[in-house]
Amino acid sequence: MQCVILAAGNGKRLRPLTEDKPKQLVTVHGKPLIDYIVEALPSAIDELIIVVGYRGDMIREYCGEIFHGKRVTYIDQFVAEGTARALWLCKDLLKGRFLFMFGDDIHGREDLARAVSFVRSILVSSVTSPEKFGIVVRNPDGTLGLMIEKPEHAPSNCASTGAMVLDDHIFEFEPQTPVGDEYYLTEVIERYAQKYPIAVVEQNLWIPIGYPEDITKAETLLSVYKRI
């Protein structure tokens, strides 16, 4: 099974930590974020497709062709056109089901294992500031109904953590609605889910890394969860 990891962003919010490196190489307890991400992947994942951009050469050098026992293919995203465009760059490499993740969040190993047990799934977590996240609304049967990006008036506090099990049917739904110059996966996933049901899976451990202060929070949480 393949895993797509988006790692092309320039990490502006994480500066000054990202002034000379991509955010995937910023360390938590002395270990780069990319290690936490890949170490948590289920054993079913045997290939990584990493989309690189800012300081991509450093990620290539660090991860190499085999990283934590998994083959690595790199895709360059030279222009920041959003998460949907980043996934579409991988279209010709993807076959069947795959795991999709952002390259700056730490996920629990057990959560990812539960996610891949479903044909298609999206991991979610309850948040206190839903206006900052992509918010998920469930159908009565527990599958994904709506996804709303950073709503002013959120219909729930259930946020997507960015980790999803998708399949190549998603490429039937071309990105349509740009926000500025970027195309995001939110509207694509919503249309995709209408035809191909996506299970909504509650997540126990999710540590988003967006700002320098999040590093300290992550180190505290990982100590509690004994993940260091």
Image (tube, helix red, strand yellow):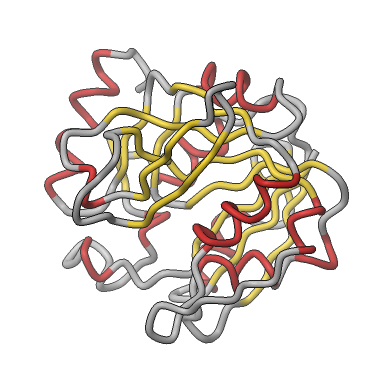
Give residue 158's position: percent from left, percent from top.
34, 33
Q: Answer left or right for 36 relative to 228.
A: right
Q: On the rendered structure, is 39 left or right of 130?
A: right
Q: Residue at x 66, y 38 (%)?
A: 165
Question: Is 147 on the left or on the right of 113, as rendered?
Answer: left
Task: Give the farthest residue toward the front.
Answer: 140
Q: Is 123 above or below relative to 182?
A: above
The quadrant of the picture occupied by the N terminus is top right
Task: Residue 220 in the image: state x and y as whole percent.
Answer: 18, 25
Query: How many numbered dots are placed on residues in this image?
Result: 0
Q: Nearer the viewer, residue 216 or 178?
A: 178
Residue occupying the point 23% across, 52% down = 132
Q: Is residue 143 above or below residue 95?
A: above
Seen at 68% across and 45% down, the residue is 3
Q: Residue at x 48, y 51 (%)?
A: 102
Q: Position of residue 121 (x, y in %)?
A: 62, 33
Give the image location of residue 119, x and y in percent. 76, 30
Q: Image quadrant for the C terminus? A: top left
Quadrant of residue 174 within the rendered picture: bottom right
Image quarter of residue 41: top right
